[in-house]
Image: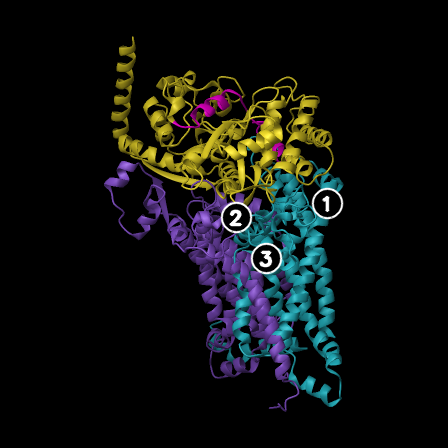
Amino acid sequence: MSDRTIDRVAQATPVRVARKIRGLSDRAIAWIFISPTIFLLLAINIFPLIWTIQLSFTNYKANRIGREVKDVGLRNYERILTDTDTWLNMQATAHFLFWTIFFQVLIGFTLAWLINKKFKGNDLWTTIIVLPMMLSPAVVGNFWKFLYQPQIGLFNYIVSWFTGKEPSSFEMLGSVTLAPWAIVIVDTWMWTPFVMLICLAGLRSIPDYIYEAAEIDRASKLRQFFTITIPMVLPFLMLAVLFRGIENFKMFDLVVQLTGGGPGSVTELTSINLKREAFEKWRTGYASAYAIILFVTVFGLASIYVKALNKVKQR
Amino acid sequence: MTYFKLASASAMVLAATTLSTRANAEDLTLCWAAWDPANALVELSKEFEAESGHTMNFEFVPWPNFADRMLNELNSGGKLCDLLIGDSQWIGGGAENGHYVKLNDFFDAEGISMDDFAPATVYAYSTWPKGTPNYYALPAMGDANGWFYRKDWFEDPEIQAAYKDATGQDLREPQSQKELLQIAQFFQGREIDGKTVYGAAIFTERGSEGITMGVTGALYPWGFKYENTPGSYDMEGAVNSPEAVEALEFYKEFYETATPPGYTNSYMGESLDAFKSGQVAMAMNWFAFFPGLYADPNTGGDKIDFFVNPPQNQPGSTLGGQGISVVSYSDKQDAALEYIKWFAQPEVQAKWWELGGYSAHNSVLEDPGFVDSQPFAGDFLEAMAGVQDFWQEPAYAELLLAMQKRIHDYVVADQGTAQEALDLLIEDWTEVFEDEGKL
Amino acid sequence: MSSFSVTEPSNRSKWIAGALVIGYALITMIPLVWILLTGFKSPADAISYPPKVVFEPTLEGYVNLFTTRTRQTQEFLDANPPQNWADEIVRQYDMVIVGPSKFGERFMNSVIIGFGSTFLSIFLGTLAAYAFSRFKVPLKDDLLFFILSTRMMPPVAVAIPIFLMFRNLGLSDTHLGMILLYTGVNISLAVWLLKGFIDEIPREYEEAALIDGYTRFQAFYKVVLPQAATGIASTAIFCLIFAWNEYAFAVLLTSANAQTAPPFIPTIIGIGGLDWPAVAAGATIFLIPVMIFTILMRKHLLRGITFGAVRK
């Protein structure tokens, strides 16, 4: 609907002020404004992506200059998809994605809801809570590894202080059962503020008169929460989930610094494995195929998700 | 004869000096890992700058990124480094992919003989294919994995008595791997000075090369071999020999019963931290760190001593260390070669050792005063006599990462048996060699 | 004192909310405070077992962060008394300061690349967002989704071609190359955020300006830009946070010339092993610029996050 207005404006103005725009039509301006962005995206994203697709059908190794490059067809894809390790990595990634998003949404929304009560000094505390996401993930991973150290780190001592458990009796990063949770904790610590900010924006976008109307109808607070607050914030929440999902699917610097994929391979996320294949083993062709598989997965999931998001928005 | 040699040598140095003053002064960049010995090299190189008129720049990359960053640089044909002190396993790739300049003609022309360097270091750091007289590097930094321990605890009469009670033996520097474990288990969980201490810090790192470098410290003394016949890539029965299985089980037992909690992903830095914070009685690490450890104000000096990786069925230590190579993409190869020539001189090598670098030059190692020059000097000689290295194939990184995964899965994540881990490792390695066209 | 507004929470619920939020903030601060404290510990205190909460503060970490040092012989130390307090600190390890470390350079690289790419992202992003918001662009929705989709690519997926491409164009390890790269990564976010803001600015303002005789360009920067200032500020925060902290590309594509601080900080080596106080000092100093930037712009932060996409 509103698009029509733009069109009307866009088409109508040149007639009226044609002399003043030095011969540039709106369409020309539009392209002048958009093309640098498109060009940059083509150069930095699309061109390399096409190159990657092409490499994924070869046995190319970027570290072996003299080696003959052979076309291997779909063999790389076949090898990846039939490798049980790939599926283990996918599982580790799914665990990481699900639980980080779960906790971040839960805590992030609760915090936003509390902050929206507008208690005194909420502005200051919001700024403080946001601080962890300003740090570099590599630095965070590195430092949390230090914090998780059972002997010299702080984490186990704090847990021990609350639970009475011996500090050196458990290893957050070294135990097969705890390590997947250790990385979830760090990511949640770092990125909950992000979800919180989005939720807060959503809460503040709800006009007061809706609550006022509900109050007149004598709707209970609980009912207001479920019939007004939640539905109105939902699009924001879903957007937060989309962004966190995309970012965490790609994320590797934090976990590489924390666990290096260990113990064994229990925190070997797909992004870590991809980096190993591409820049440590230098199996460029194989890694390219792996990258394409990951990209298609995210792209597919995100497209479905964005459709759902649009539906929610239109309600 | 000696006089003549000396005269001709000094004439050559003279010629080189005049030559270099005539040549343009260059800005050379030397790349290496960022660690203690690198600082010593900066110090040492000041003399070269003064003599040659060239300026030396240094690019030191921390260990965790060193291989990634430098191999990246080489693979992209980068001109950042004129000289590179690259890890020993890179030599195959460096030679086969043409990253390193072949040095044979230069050595011949300048009268640098590889016979002047310790044979193990020449074999490991300089030659490709292994053991052939094709040289791509000059041994720069000898290194091996060794051990250090709390001498003050070992000499404490009470602790000694307790050890005697517990084991019936005297507490001493371990003479075998099993004794090493026994001592470590003795210290595990013991109260010393009001703190709980642990046996030993060992390498268990997952991401780069840590656990492989640690576990080979057990595999080699047990008699582990990579191939039945060298060069055949025939690994069945060698890699998974009964001795290898036993050694791997030993390392797992060591990890489970004699290391401090939380040392599940630890390498050089963590091993040093564990020792310096007083958590462990013993720790493994590269000899390169020993001068720094000895000088540490809290746990160095009288409190520390060193020993070579103990033998079991045979002596064996894991090789570290690097050779110095000229990067073939450099525009300043002549000046870079001049540096190597300067570095190979016995006097410079002697100074190198004095400053904390591990010279591999015979004139230094065979000097009668060498063994007593540092508390770890004798151990170093002994270690270098029994070193073995990992594969140095151009595909070494793939081979290494496969081993990292299989060993970490078994030792730390407790999956499968030692036999299965080694069987799977052979499968992984076979696949790599097939891709390489070597099988 | 009861409020008449039904949407205003009661004092009691405010108090509880405040207590809970402050409680969370305090817990979340622990690691940050620990980083800050570690920066003022001596290396031995930093790795003490059990961890020390009370310790004697020292600036050693900061000295180690900013200087390179070398071990010297006793004779040299005796002959050359310490020149200043920093020198004094390193003397206890029989060392002397020989020059500045690379941290200053790395930090400056981060400033140049971080702010440079933020500026470029905002500049290009505003233009594109304006065009998408105001003009009829063929395949608009597809183009917008295309722009967003570039954000989904794992960096490693394109890293190899970018690596080869940069090498051929001579952009490896240059400030320009990194600025372009980060702009390429950030621009999708910038376009989406800014389009939301510009959509909200009533078109009537520009129409009036156009009728008053402004050209499109004039209308754009005299009317639209000032109105969009808030959105630009908050978009800038997000672009800066990313570019400032990015690690994967930085570690692969930069070394001597253009390396930024994130790959550098976690790897500051002391005498044998990581120098934790120096690492912590580096992390602290590195946090300060974005922190100040965020505090200055905090009023706009919330608006930025609305992601116009949701509003439409």
User: For the residues tagged 3 and 2, is the chain the same?
Assistant: no
Question: Could you say whether the residue bearing mark 2 is in a helix, strand or loop?
Answer: loop
Residue tagged 3 = A158
Kindly check if marks 3 and 1 are in contact, taking CB atoms under 8 A apart as contact: no
Q: Colour of chain B?
A: yellow
Q: What residue is at 72 percent from the left and 62 percent from the top?
A: A305
Which chain contains the residue that carries disc 1? A
Residue at figure coordinates x 27%, y 19% from the top left: B10
Give amino acid for label 3: Ile
Q: Is residue C67 above or below residue C244?
A: above
The chain that hosts pointer 3 is A
Indicate the colour of chain C.
purple
- Label drawn at residue C49: 2
Residue A88: give its label: 1
Give whichever of C276, C132 is nearer the camera.
C276
Residue type at tag 1: Leu
Residue at coordinates 59% horizontally, 41% vertically from top-left?
B260
